[in-house]
Image (tube, helix red, strand yellow):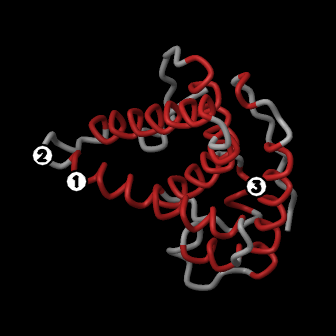
Amino acid sequence: MPRSIFALFKSKKTDDGKAGALFDAALKQSLLPAFYADYGVPDTLDGRFDNLSLHLFLIMNPLTATKDGQALSQDIFDIAFRYMEKDLREAGIGDMGVPKHMKRMMKGFNGRVHAYKAALEGSDWDEALRHNLYGTVADIDAAALRGMVAYIKRNVKSLQAQDLMEGRARFAPPKGK
């Protein structure tokens, strides 16, 4: 499975064990056309980063319940940002610009994680998605937003019931709005 969200998703051979397999699962799921066609996620670099961040959160969040899970979650984060850094370099961002871009991306990811965690704890999923997944969309389709919230809730439940420590994640499929 390709691991690049910037370099036109070209394949990269690596062996990152369980964390790599979970990263691949999140990336593969985040690239499904339904998110961009049915759920209105912008099919841009920012939109793909935002969608990947959401899917990484869905996998990483249940892992934080245990010490071993926290370590695996950190490994997933490290893999994700290692590949993003490599992709920035392949896209022509020079050595002086990469740290600035990486800092902005990590800060953005961290903000999304906090917003999604608050939504899980009873805050408003609609609001969390409006500011994070759909942050660049001027007019968000209400049906698409409802569909995305339903998709997230299905996957929160499904992924919490899985043994992610085995290095496998099975996402529920997206459904049309």
Residue at image location 76% in from the left, 65% down from the top: 148
The mark tally for this picture is: 3
Under circle 1, the secondary element is helix
Query: Where in the figure is residue 149, as x and y percent of width and height?
Result: 78, 67
Given residues 122 and 26, the one toward you in this image is: 122
Q: Which residue is mark 2?
A: 96
Left or right: 159 with respect to 102?
A: right
> Is disc 1 in contact with disc 2, using a CB cutoff of under 8 Å?
yes
Give me the C-alpha separation between circle 1 and circle 3.
32 Å
Above or below: residue 51 compared with residue 122: above
Under circle 3, the secondary element is helix
Picture disc at residue 100: 1
Q: Which residue is mark 3?
A: 34
Name which of mark 1 and mark 3 comes first in the sequence. Answer: 3
Query: Where in the figure is residue 15, as x and y percent of width and height?
Result: 52, 14
Give me the C-alpha separation between circle 3 and circle 2.
37 Å
Q: Nearer the viewer, mark 3 or mark 2?
A: 2
Name which of mark 3 and mark 2 comes first in the sequence. Answer: 3
Above or below: residue 114 compared with residue 85: below
Query: Where in the figure is residue 146, as x and y percent of width and height?
Result: 81, 74
Residue type, mark 3 in image? Ala
Under circle 2, the secondary element is loop
Residue at image location 54% in from the left, 54% down from the top: 48
Residue type, mark 1 in image? Lys
Task: Point out the residue furthest to the bottom here.
Answer: 139
Residue at image location 74% in from the left, 73% down from the top: 122
> Is disc 3 in contact with disc 2, using a CB cutoff of under 8 Å?
no
Task: Point out the residue furthest to the left here.
Answer: 96
Other-residue count near label 1 (Cα within 10 Å), few / some / many at <14 / 14–19 / ≥20? few
For the C terminus, give its image quadrant: bottom right
Residue at image location 61% in from the left, 31% down from the top: 24
